[in-house]
Image: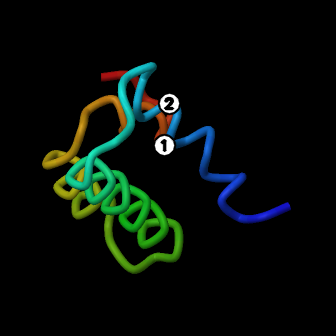
């Protein structure tokens, strides 16, 4: 299995049935994924993670963090 196959469900949920992602939306999703990995690896605090997410699409928080907004 290719690693992109693991990302496809995340991408589809982020789009929420919408049109293909534009460049800004791809950048936003990448920032969310980067923040989640950094949190998981102990590179940032919960507060830093939340600040990063505040600047991104609210639906993505529910997708990656399991919390509804």
Point out residue 11 in the picture as x, y percentages from the top left corner.
Answer: 50, 42
Q: Residue shown at 20%/52% (left/top)?
A: 24
> Secondary structure under badge 1?
helix
Give the vertical position of 45 relative to 5 (above or below): below
How many marks the image carries: the answer is: 2
User: Is 69 or 8 nearer to us in this picture?
Assistant: 8
Q: Residue at x 48, y 43 (%)?
A: 64
Mark in front: 2 vs 1:
2
Q: Which mark is residue 64?
A: 1
Taking the spot 40% from the left edge, 31% from the top edge, the residue there is 15
From the image, which quarter does the C terminus lie in? top left
Between the residue at mark 2 and the residue at mark 1, the CA separation in whole angstroms equals 10 Å
Residue in the foreground of this view, choosing between 63 and 28? 28
Q: Nearer the viewer, residue 58 or 2?
A: 2
Q: If you read the primary sequence from the N terminus, does the residue marked by circle 2 or circle 1 appear first?
A: 2
- Name the spot of residue 13 as percent of width and height, x first: 50, 30
Task: Identify residue for label 2.
Answer: 13
Q: Mark on residue 33?
A: none
- Which corner quadrant of the image does residue 10 belong to? top right
- Give the image location of residue 6, x and y in percent: 69, 53
Residue 12 in the image: above or below residue 45: above
Quarter of the image where the N terminus is located:
bottom right
């Amino acid at each position: 299995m290719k690693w992109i196959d693991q990302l496809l469900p995340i991408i589809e949920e982020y789009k929420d049935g919408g049109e293909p992602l534009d460049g800004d939306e791809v950048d936003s999703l990448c920032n969310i994924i980067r923040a989640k990995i950094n949190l998981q690896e102990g590179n940032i605090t919960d507060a830093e993670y939340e600040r990063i997410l505040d600047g991104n699409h609210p639906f993505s928080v529910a997708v990656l963090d399991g919390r509804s907004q």
